[in-house]
Image: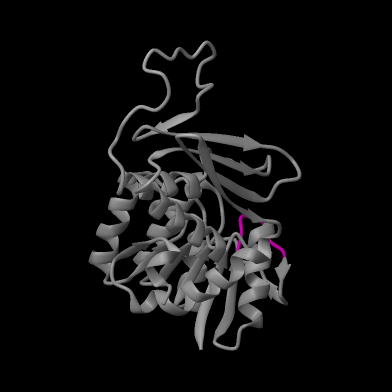
């Protein structure tokens, strides 16, 4: 059995993760942590992450907390030689490098996925393939209005994956003027990303390619948080066999 601690256990994603871990025959939910006390899956929720890691000695910590807290949580887990499986977005490139260094120092692997939905991973892989032939592309990501960071980690990773196969260039008219600041969205290597935050959405993304006389759109929709659970469970099972920091669910798919 792989022993799992869930951090952020009383949040909407945290509760769903706790249920998924409990339901899997190869995983054991040994502890739940949040900033407030409570109960989940018949466990009393701990409020001190470091103390809980030392007390319950899990193999894996799943983190679905807040962007402002995730880096410290990951470093705490690694210091205790517990492998983080991270779904919280908002880590900077500098943060990720520090995590890589901590993985090496503590000889403990870590895993980060901007999106744990298998369909979202397939969308990103497909977008990278299409971009070889249709390099003019923009990304629209749509999430619930409680999401704290923008753009989404999925949109940012999609843009970076597309950038691997296309030359960086500015899209649109060369003399284009933004009459309202940021109306054209964020710019990642010449790829525009547009973020929508509204109640009613969960997690959605469109990648729109344009060509001479044609457009091609691929879209992924997560209509419930259970869509992320197969990916979370898979990461819990595979993370201990990895080395260093691994980013992206595509890296552990067969």
Can residue 74 be seen by looking at this rendering? yes
Q: Nearer the viewer, residue 76 or 4?
A: 4
Q: Give the answer, above or below, for where 169 lies relative to 18.
A: above
Q: Residue at x 41, y 19 (%)?
A: 173
Q: Which residues are magenta?
A: 33-38
The answer to whether 10 appears left or right of 238 in the picture is right
Q: Residue at x 39, y 52 (%)?
A: 128
Q: Give the mark count.
A: 0
Q: Residue at x 47, y 79 (%)?
A: 237
Estimate the x, y position of residue 62 in percent, counting from the top left.
52, 66
Q: Is 111 inside the magenta-drawn segment? A: no
Can residue 77 be seen by looking at this rendering? no
Extreme residue in the right direction: 200
Residue 110's image quarter? bottom left
Q: Nearer the viewer, residue 224 or 193?
A: 193
Residue 42's image quarter? bottom right
Estimate the x, y position of residue 182 in percent, counting from the top left.
50, 21
Estimate the x, y position of residue 6 in percent, counting from the top left.
57, 68
Q: Which quadrant: the C terminus? A: bottom left
Q: Residue at x 71, y 75 (%)?
A: 41
Q: Nearer the viewer, residue 83 or 204?
A: 204
| Colouring chosen for the image of the structure | one colour
Estimate the x, y position of residue 46 in percent, counting from the top left.
61, 66
Instruction: Considering the whole magenta stretch, tell me its main secondary structure.
Output: loop
């Amino acid at each position: 059995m792989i022993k799992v601690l869930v951090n952020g256990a009383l949040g909407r994603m945290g509760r769903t993760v706790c249920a998924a871990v409990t339901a899997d025959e190869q995983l054991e939910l040994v502890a739940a942590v949040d900033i407030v006390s409570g109960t989940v899956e018949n466990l009393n929720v701990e409020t001190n992450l470091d103390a809980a890691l030392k007390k319950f000695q899990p193999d894996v910590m799943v983190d679905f907390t807040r962007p402002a807290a995730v880096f410290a949580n990951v470093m705490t887990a690694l210091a205790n030689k517990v492998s983080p499986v991270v779904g919280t977005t908002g880590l900077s490139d500098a943060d990720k490098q520090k995590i890589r260094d901590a993985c090496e120092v503590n000889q403990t692997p870590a895993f980060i996925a901007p999106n744990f939905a298998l369909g979202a991973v397939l969308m990103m892989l497909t977008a990278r393939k299409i971009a070889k032939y249709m390099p003019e592309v923009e990304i629209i990501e749509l999430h619930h209005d409680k999401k704290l960071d923008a753009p989404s980690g999925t949109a940012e990773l999609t843009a970076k994956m597309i950038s691997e196969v296309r030359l960086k260039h500015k899209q649109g008219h060369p003399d284009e003027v933004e009459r309202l600041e940021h109306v054209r969205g964020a710019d990642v290597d010449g790829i525009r990303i547009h973020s929508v935050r509204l109640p009613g959405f969960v997690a959605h993304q469109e990648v729109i390619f344009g060509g001479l006389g044609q457009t091609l759109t691929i879209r992924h929709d997560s209509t419930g948080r259970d869509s992320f659970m197969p990916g979370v469970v898979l990461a819990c099972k595979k993370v201990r066999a990895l080395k260093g920091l691994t980013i992206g669910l595509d890296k552990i798919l067969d």
